[in-house]
Image (cartoon, rainbow, N blue to C red):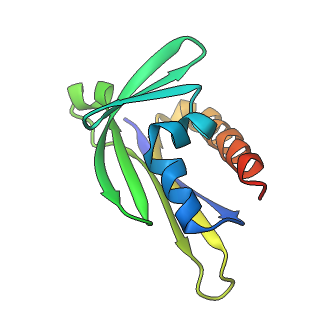
Amino acid sequence: MKEKYELEFILNSSPRILESMFSSADGLSEWFADNVKVKEDVYTFEWDGSSEQARLIHHKLHSKVKFKWLADEEDDLDSFFEIGYNIDPITNQVVLTITDFAYPEDRESAILLWNQQVSDLKRLLGA
């Protein structure tokens, strides 16, 4: 059974810029996947010649996007991945929160992958 985990990162960017990075195919193609295509509410993410599809199940403007992998829908698993961000009221920095699920044996590699993707995002933002 997949287990939920959360990661937090500090970004030096404005929420306005982040909105397109997290919710548009072009933005997600810049840092999350090699290529992203959208048809209605289904996003196709491509990495190194393979692809996976996820349904956008929630989008709160300037706050978060939440996706569910179609493969998990078929298995009726209660798992998703969510990219959320807000401004810390004390430091005024943007806090990026990733919520995801992984099997216990895959958790470490999933976290490493998120760390790499967020590193790519920071480089892209110049943050």
Q: Residue at x 65, y 40 (%)?
A: 117
Instruction: Please provide percent x and percent y for residue 43.
Output: 37, 32
Q: Residue at x 42, y 22 (%)?
A: 52
**Is residue 105 toward the left or the right of residue 120 in the image?**
left
Q: Residue at x 47, y 29 (%)?
A: 36
Instruction: Report the residue that reaches farthest toward the bottom.
Output: 90
Instruction: Please provide percent x and percent y for residue 94.
Output: 62, 70
| Quarter that holds the N terminus | top left
Note whether 107 is above or below 13 in the view shown: above
Instruction: Please provide percent x and percent y for residue 125.
Output: 71, 53
Q: Quadrant of residue 30?
A: top right
Note whether 75 is above or below 59 in the view shown: above
Note whether 31 is above or below 14 in the view shown: above
**Is residue 42 toward the left or the right of residue 118 in the image?**
left
Instruction: Please provide percent x and percent y for residue 41.
Output: 26, 38
Q: Is residue 114 visible?
A: yes
Q: Quadrant of residue 95?
A: bottom right
| Quarter that holds the C terminus | bottom right
Note whether 94 is above or below 43 in the view shown: below
**Is residue 121 toward the left or the right of residue 70 in the image?**
right
Q: Is residue 4 visible?
A: no
Q: How many marks?
A: 0
Q: Residue at x 72, y 46 (%)?
A: 124
